[in-house]
Image (spheres, helix red, strand yellow):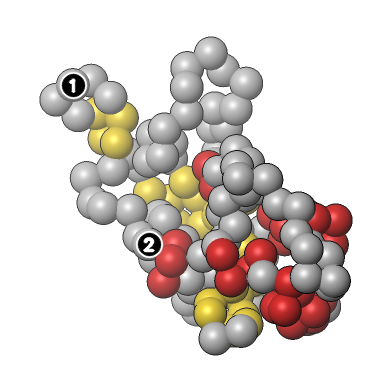
Amino acid sequence: MIEGVGGGLIAYSDLILVQCPECRSCARITTPNNAKGLINPRYMGHESKRLQCIKCGLTKEVHPKRRWDNLWAYTHELFDEKQGLDWYFGLPLYLQIQCCGHKMWFFNFDHLSLVEKYIKKNIRPSGLYYLSIESRLPKWMKLSKNREEVLKAITKLKQQ
Ligand SMILES: [Zn+2]
């Protein structure tokens, strides 16, 4: 799994690219009422999400419900990104690829570029690496021996 560098995945969850269940092209999951910038902290599952495919016109929404403690939350468990699925609809993430025997995936192109930049800058082919302890990237991605393969896989996804 790949979390955002620093901040965590929630920072990238305003746009999630997935495979459309109808036509298999790239569909978008967005947050119609983007809570970013509001004073309230953001919690996973607190916001309504919209799935939209421009190619075939598919549109779906999921809405959280108000809980006993007055918080808004989904009644179902969020799907597991480690399985390469989006949290809300459980659809396969569009940007995913096998790499070094692991599943590598990203929520969107911003997320992908950020990780790419991070690896280019911080992991040296010489074998030394300068990643800070805060980095949430999985260990296998931080190994300098995997650097070239990881970057190659990222380039492949970018051309998708
Ligand atoms: Zn579609």
Residue at (33% x, 53% y) in the render: 78
Q: Horizontal placement of 75 versus 50: left or right?
A: left
Q: Horizontal placement of 43 versus 37: left or right?
A: left
Q: Earlier in the sequence, mark 1 or mark 2?
A: 1
In the displayed structure, would residue 129 be above or below residue 15?
Answer: below
Residue type marked 2: Asp
Residue 97 percent location from the top left of the image: 62, 80
Residue at (40% x, 55% y) in the render: 88
The answer to whether marks 1 and 2 mark residues whose Cβ atoms lie closer than 8 Å is no
- SS at badge 2: loop
**Which one is in front, 56 or 36?**
36
Beta carbon of the mark 2 residue lies under 8 A of ligand 1: no
Q: Say which mark, if any, is on residue 27.
A: none
Q: Horizontal placement of 142 versus 139: left or right?
A: right
In the displayed structure, would residue 86 be above or below residue 15?
Answer: below
Whether residue 54 is visible: yes
Q: Horizontal placement of 114 versus 85: left or right?
A: right
Whether residue 14 is visible: no
**Which one is in front, 123 or 39?**
123
In the displayed structure, would residue 37 be above or below residue 154?
Answer: above
The residue pinned by badge 1 equals 69
The residue pinned by badge 2 equals 80
| Image quadrant where one finds the C terminus | bottom right
